[in-house]
Image (cartoon, rainbow, N blue to C red):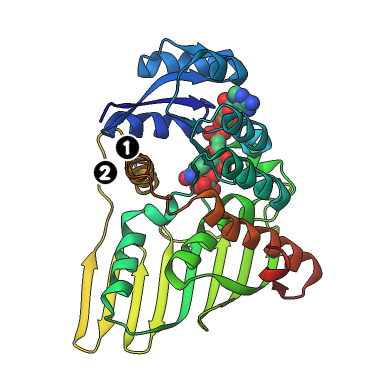
Amino acid sequence: MAELRGALIGCGFFAVNQMHAWRDIEGASIVAICDRGPDRLRIVGDQFGITKRYIDAAELFADESLDFVDIATTAPSHRPLVEMAARYRVPVICQKPFAPTLADAKAMVKACADAGVPLMVHENFRWQSPIQAVRAVLDSGKIGTPFFGRISFRSAHDVFSGQPYLAKGKRFIIEDLGIHSLDIARFLLGDVSTITTRTARINPDIAGEDVATMLMDHKNGATSVVDCSYATKLAVEPFPETLIEIDGSDGTIRLAQGYRLTVTGKSGTKILDVSPPLLPWASRPWHNIQESVVAIQQHWVDCLAKGTEPATSGADNLQTFALVEAAYLGAASHEPVHLDALL
Ligand code: NAD
Ligand code: 89Y
């Protein structure tokens, strides 16, 4: 099959990982880039040898013949850019958070569905190899039927120096990081019927919440706790590890700090090192996230080749995004929120 021709829109902090990953992936390459900021356009264009550069996404779509577009801008621009891709019938990947609101997210899914255009949200955390290892244990049946889960991300890593906009929004940790943890909870334990949320802001220098604790009822009867914090100072900083506990009818799974996976089943306990590989262009501690970028982008290329729906399609991501919206509603009201009322 001929190599897919892609364009990347948004050449900021995280897009560099996506550009590295596209270089590693077989079957696709980035032929043009776009950023409304000339400096970022030049820096990323020069770093990756891309000569076709656009300041305006409309000109990119009008001039280029593309097999897909990869949107790596922040949320406010996602809806107009995804709808533009749909108008030009160009398959589209969109970074998380998918949109500023659930109403926008639903409109974006509809625009792509109506145009017959594949849409994947770059929801990459579930593609981290330690998380995939947990999923594989569940699939093996070793712990039986899961009835409890805890998905935990607690850190004091300074994320604001690389992503200063995170300090300014009224919404912070649920929309930015918790969205990944909520998606992992869905990936491991299935869709959710009800969520109860408490939040706090510990860091006085930011506008949004930096601590969130969420209790969820999954439709299959399991209960989970999703907790995240950027105000947790630990002896050994775990960023960006997601720690997981799952209890099942026949055993337990523990993904502990240092990528140590302990599985206890009927035949005893096994301890595995599920550390992600350090790719040649990656840097610690981001290598866990960086590897998952390669995995999700390869998944996109495979899905386009086979004509199958990506695991984190726009439609799938509405379920994760609805949890974000429900968490903020519940944090404000101190009441449980039923997901069916939002979807
Ligand atoms: P950033 O601000 O560093 O970069 C965004 C870039 O997009 C900027 O250079 C900006 O000029 C450009 N841009 C914005 N609107 C545009 C438009 N309409 N047309 C062209 N260019 C436009 O942001 P970032 O930190 O790289 O984050 C980008 C997205 O990636 C965010 O949604 C963030 O949540 C997400 N992110 C994801 C992960 C992950 O693991 N999935 C990690 C970090 C960030
Ligand atoms: O933006 C966030 C993400 O998606 O992963 C980690 C992060 O960069 C900071 O919380």
Instruction: Find residue 282 and name its label.
Output: 1
* Element class at badge 2: loop
Residue in the image at 69% along x and 59% along y? 325
* Element class at badge 1: loop
Q: Give left or right: position of 161 versus 125.
A: right
Residue in the image at 63% along x and 63% along y? 323
Q: Position of residue 341 (x, y in %)?
A: 73, 68
Which residue is label 2 attached to? 278
Q: CA distance from mark 1 to mark 2?
A: 6 Å
Residue 298 occupies quadrant: top left
**Above or below 254: residue 204:** above
Q: Position of residue 103 (x, y in %)?
A: 72, 50
Extreme-top residue of the structure: 51
* Mark 2 neighbour density, 10 Å: few (under 14) some (14–19) many (20 or more): some
Q: Position of residue 2 (x, y in %)?
A: 27, 26
Instruction: Report the amino acid beneath label 1.
Output: Ala
Instruction: Report the amino acid beneath label 2.
Output: Leu
Q: Position of residue 226 (x, y in %)?
A: 55, 69
Where's the C terminus, which quadrant? bottom right
Extreme-right residue of the structure: 333
Q: Which sits in the foreground, 65 or 161?
A: 65
Where's the N terminus, which quadrant? top left
Any part of residue 146 in sight: yes
Instruction: Find residue 205 and name its label.
Output: none
Residue in the image at 63% along x and 34% along y? 83
Q: Which sits in the foreground, 250 or 300?
A: 300
**Above or below 60: residue 316:** below
> Badges 1 and 2: C-beta atoms under 8 Å apart?
yes
Q: Which sits in the foreground, 291 or 199?
A: 291
* Mark 1 neighbour density, 10 Å: few (under 14) some (14–19) many (20 or more): some
**Above or below 72: residue 46:** above
Q: Give left or right: position of 101 versus 226.
A: right
